Image: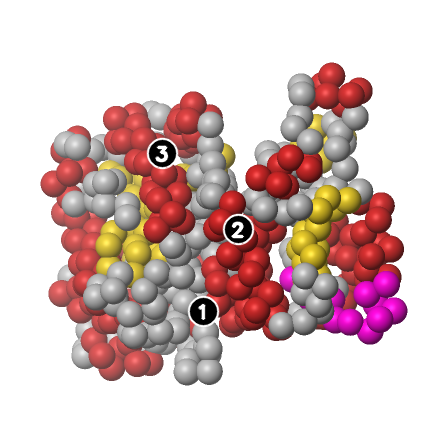
Amino acid sequence: MFSKSVYLERRKKLKEKVGSGVVLLLGNDNSPIETYAHNYPFRQESSFLYYSGVNQITSLSLLIDIDNDREIIFGDDISLEDQMWTGRVESLGRVAERFGIKEVSQTAFLQNYLSKVIAEKREIHYLPTCRSNLMLKLENLLKIPARDVNKHASAKLIIAIISQRECKTNEEVSEIEDAIKVSSEVYSMLRREIAPGRTERELLAKCNAVLGTNGNIASFPTILTVNSSILHNWKSDKTLKKVDLLLVDSGVMSNGGYASDITRTYPVSRFFTLQQKNIYDIVLMAQSSAIESIRPGVFYKDIHLQAAKTITKGLIDVGLMKGNAEDAVSVGAHALFFPHGLGHMLGMDVHDMEILGEENVGYDNEVQRSSQFGISFLRLARKLKKGFVLTVEPGIYFIEDLINVWKTEYRHKDFINYEELEKYRHFEGIRIEDDVLVTENGSRVLSQCIPKAIEKIDKGKG
């Protein structure tokens, strides 16, 4: 992790931004599989990790008493009996001191501390959570029904944390690049191993083996599928055929807790057909032009719309769409083929900070969410800032159920060539995604080490 001074400065800025009261940040607990002795791989709660630095220790709480200038980690050292199973574990006090937290107390005393804060009518600031066990913990600590916990999360704390976490420091970018290095190994392996007759399950196991060899875990469940018209298809039960395209959307969590998120689409035969090449070219052109437009001060929504127009122009050229591209995008006709947003923030979470509210992270008072199908799914629309790390992931899909509905209703008939579309019903889809840093005057593609140019992946090259 980073130096003690980084965490001291982060907590200092947080106290300045929140101003008064008590900040309560809960670390994650172990998540049991079928018994408390067997758990899913542990992943620390991101904001807790961001401010405490404490990563691989479970069931901790960080309390920052702004009014009394105290920072306390609440948790329990494991017993000698437990250490027979785990091996020797460093004391919580020594771990906390490494990150500049001088006070450590047992979990049992947290309730008493918070009860006094409540009695003094001081505000307790906490974050929303998607974990039911943390909701129940907050219910017990704060006497708020678990179903209402997220409703009472601190807006002031949410805004303060987003303002600190949204722009990445050089050290944080290096962590993301560490994750990308392992992602690069994953995709290099796939380029060698993809072949007709291989199963999705077999290739997924090989991806996991690369992560395990490097001592990493996935930043989200890997999507590895020939049925790419299902945008987040986590089924891996197909055998690859020569005519298939294989879409792999995967990410790695660095040892310091930062994520990568990259998608590539490969021809199983190692040769693109003309039809596949035409669609791939359009997606790659849309992504390249979008990346070229990234710079501070530009609305990401505008870059999304630019990508949609590039896709629409390309689909007009191959006969799948018709009319004027700008008019088609203005009414949402492109969304039959490109129904999702261009990308999202990336950092300690693969959809960075979205548990704090997508409207808070991706939108602001300058740009509100569109109600138009397709654009409404855009996770990031606001102006970009230097230090943002985001994904750029346009795609073209042929979603049979969606095609059937639109064709039956003859929706956007002035822009969609439904007769030509019949030739693509079983095409599935193509998506290309990279991780991009917003720099002072433009951008830098952090994942450029993973080939995506046709000449690098066609005919078995690269």
Give the left or right position of residue 448, taking residue 263 as reference: left
Q: Which residue is mark 1?
A: 362
Task: Give the residues drawn in magenta, as a range.
Answer: 116-128
Q: Position of residue 280 (x, y in %)?
A: 21, 51
Label 2 is placed on what type of residue? Tyr
Residue toward you, 407 or 223: 223
What's the CA distance linking mark 3 and mark 2?
A: 26 Å
Label 3 element class: helix
Q: Quadrant of residue 140?
A: bottom right
Q: Quadrant of residue 158?
A: bottom right
Residue drawn at the location 30% of the way across and 81% of the way down: 330
Label 1 is placed on what type of residue? Gly
Judged by depth in the image, the label closer to the viewer, 1 or 2, is 2
Residue drawn at the location 46% of the way across and 82% of the way down: 365
Q: Position of residue 210 (x, y in %)?
A: 40, 27
- Is 323 in the magenta? no
Q: Which residue is mark 3?
A: 182
Q: Quadrant of residue 124?
A: bottom right
Going from the N terminus, do you reach mark 1 or mark 2 first? 2
Q: Which residue is mark 2?
A: 7
